[in-house]
Image: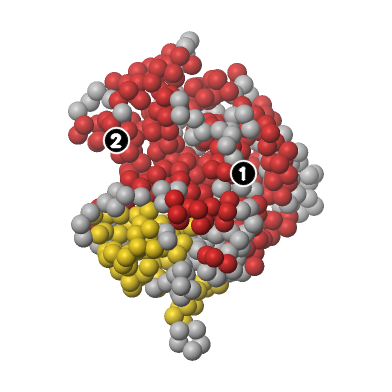
Amino acid sequence: MTTTGIHPDNQVPELKDYNVYTSDPTLRASVARGGAAWRDEELARQGAEYGAEATLRAAEDANRHEPELHTHSRTGERIDQVSFHPAWHTMMGIARRNGIANLPFFDERPSAWVGYGASLYMHSQIESGSTCPTTMTKACIPVVRRNAALYAALRDKLASNEHDARDITLEGKTSITVGMGMTEKQGGSDVRTNTTRAVPAGAGPWGEEFLITGHKWFFSAPMCDGHLVLAKTDEHGSSCFFVPRWRPDGGKNAVHIQRLKDKVGNRSNSSSEVEFKDAWGVLVGDEGRGIPTIIEMATVTRLDCALASAGFMRQGFAQALHYARNRHAFGKALADQPVMTALLADMALESQAATLLAMGLASRFGSAAPLDTAWRRLLTPAAKFWNCKRAVALTGEAMEVFGGNGYVEESPMGRLFREAPVNSIWEGSGNVMCLDVLRAVSRNPDDVHLVLDQLHEVATGEPRVQDALQAVRKMTQLPPQELEQQARRFTQRLVLAAQACLMLKHASAEESAAFLSSRFDPDWGPVTGISAGTSDPAALLHAAWR
């Protein structure tokens, strides 16, 4: 499907006007298996939209023409306004229309999580910056519901699938975006050290009102219509507040943007530093319970990181395979050179396992069954850790397939490569994720055994996987301090065992055998392409692209 014939100058034509969904057999099977076949036709429409040349150009423009900060008007008034190229709003409109801002919280079918996951996975492949405010909006919904009056005022605006780019009060908006502000300069991931303060300011139609003073070192998407913000009250400690961009009285809220972050990637999205100067906010959840309240939002966005990083890997593989099939050297296509075939096959396995892990995890978010709950607690931070780490390595390999052609800005690989690290950092770095896995083990010890028992059953007849599962189970018995020192090793073993079982259960016999042979090969790991676990790697490539 990606072979277009030999170009007279041996240059590879752009991968465009293809269907991101229907060309991905693992994704499509995951949607059907997750009970979301009702969304298949819509996902096929989205897949064509994402692969269309017009969408690719909009994604490029949104990143080439970066957001600009304007702190004051020409008459000296504080406006704290970020202006965007129209292409940014094009991508935000696509994301909103495709359900990424709200689908699983306004569609009662549990499989809506799978349908949502497929859309996010595809959107991330084409333009990642617009997923940040969009997925935060989705993740805020269960948190905002803790304030019934506030939710009643915002519900229809959160449920809307139309992007409203206007910078006006909440009352006048047809749809809204919501971000969050947790991180401060002195604490980073340790939000317990936050110094931002909130002082009571009476009660209003949305509940208890506060005036907030302090700062946030990373305040992503400052043009969102509101943010969930952590601040401390004098009596109860950290609490969660909804802080709108515009106060209910119509005035600009005192959230002052100090500067936009000059980031390595994610250039289309505006991330900022802000100062609060008696900014108006309303309490969400119980006072003093701000951290667990806002962590509920972060848990959902961690799933998003795993899904998006799986998307990065798929796009990196698709671009590399397309290039290798259409670039010729030493008398034949690069894809037919044995060492390149093995590399691409290894990348195909990595992408497939990452997709199965992320989409399988998404399917568990719509269920309250004990096993599904255990998977969410244990595998959400583990999948975020692993998929995000592997995306960095795989997008680098994909760039290398292009050679020098991948290391210039005309190539799609530079932006993809720069996007990959952000998910490892956003919502908790790798160490934090591994520690959260251990925290899940210690707080809910029955969960890990429930998950391992289920995996052990899937791995019946596969001693390599059963040995790996036994090693994970044995590590749970280590003293806490000793286990913490091996947090990354524990998480890696857990994820690889889970991926092996997912491949055994859902991939073809040839694909699962190749995955096991390669991933349990002592030489596998540091360098992609050492082993694809099969004597016929070309067959894996044929199966990976339809």
Give neighbour class at mark 2: few <14, some 14-19, many 20+ (Cα, 10 Å): some
- Viewport quadrant of the N terminus: top right
| x and y percentages locating residue 219 in the rendered image | 41, 62
Q: Which residue is drawn at the image coordinates 30% and 25% (left, top)?
A: 445
Q: Residue 29 lies in what quarter of the image?
A: top right
Which of marks 1 and 2 precedes in the sequence? 1
Name above or below for residue 171 compared with residue 111: below
Query: Mark 2 belongs to which amino acid?
Result: Arg
User: Is 325 drawn above or below residue 17 in the view shown?
Assistant: above
What is the quadrant of residue 9 in the picture?
bottom right
Nearer to me, 448 or 224: 224
Q: State the residue in front, 234 or 327.
A: 234
Q: Depth check: give the residue in front, 324 or 25.
A: 25
Q: Circle 2 sits on which residue?
A: 439
The colour scheme is: secondary structure
Is residue 492 at least partly visible in the picture?
Answer: no
Residue assigned mark 1? 119
